[in-house]
Image (cartoon, grey):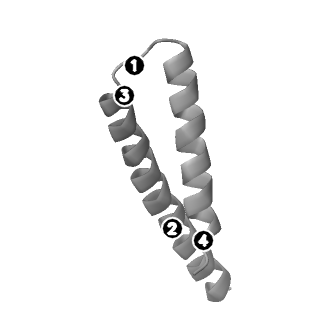
């Protein structure tokens, strides 16, 4: 099974965000940090998938 690139991008962005927040001591509770990472992965994947579909529709329209 191949992971779509937008999911990979969302995962990378979520972990970079988590590292920055943890280093700057914005969130010290790891449970809250994990929930934030999961939310970023889900929201980023959905947004990227939606944008991909919109661009595909736009290209086919022309």
The image shows residue 41 at horizontal and vertical percentages of 46, 51
Label 2 near label 4: C-beta < 8 Å?
yes
**What separation in Å lies between label 1 and label 4 (alpha carbons)?**
29 Å
Give above or below for 8 relative to 22. Answer: below
Question: Counting other residues with Cα less than 10 Å from the Cα at mark 2, is it few (<14), some (14-19), or many (20 or more)?
Answer: some
> Which numbered tag is attached to residue 2?
none
> Which numbered tag is attached to residue 4?
4
Give above or below for 22 relative to 35. Answer: above
User: Looking at this view, is 35 or 50 the one in front?
Assistant: 35
Point 61% across, 77% down: residue: 2
Camera-side mark, 1 or 2: 1
Label 4 near label 1: C-beta < 8 Å?
no
Label 3 near label 4: C-beta < 8 Å?
no
Question: Counting other residues with Cα less than 10 Å from the Cα at mark 3, is it few (<14), some (14-19), or many (20 or more)?
Answer: few
The image shows residue 40 at horizontal and vertical percentages of 44, 45
Kind of element beneath mark 4: loop
Disc nearer the start of the sequence (1/2): 1
Disc nearer the start of the sequence (4/2): 4
Kind of element beneath mark 1: loop
Camera-side mark, 2 or 3: 3
Q: Which residue is mark 1?
A: 27
Q: Quadrant of the C terminus?
A: bottom right
Point 61% across, 59% down: residue: 8
Disc nearer the start of the sequence (1/4): 4
**What separation in Å lies between label 1 and label 2 (alpha carbons)?**
28 Å
């Amino acid at each position: 099974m191949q992971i779509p690139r937008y999911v990979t991008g969302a995962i990378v962005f979520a972990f970079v965000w988590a590292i920055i927040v943890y280093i700057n001591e914005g969130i010290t509770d790891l449970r809250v940090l994990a929930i934030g990472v999961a939310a970023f992965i889900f929201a980023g994947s959905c947004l990227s998938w939606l944008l991909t579909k919109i661009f595909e529709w736009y290209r086919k329209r022309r």
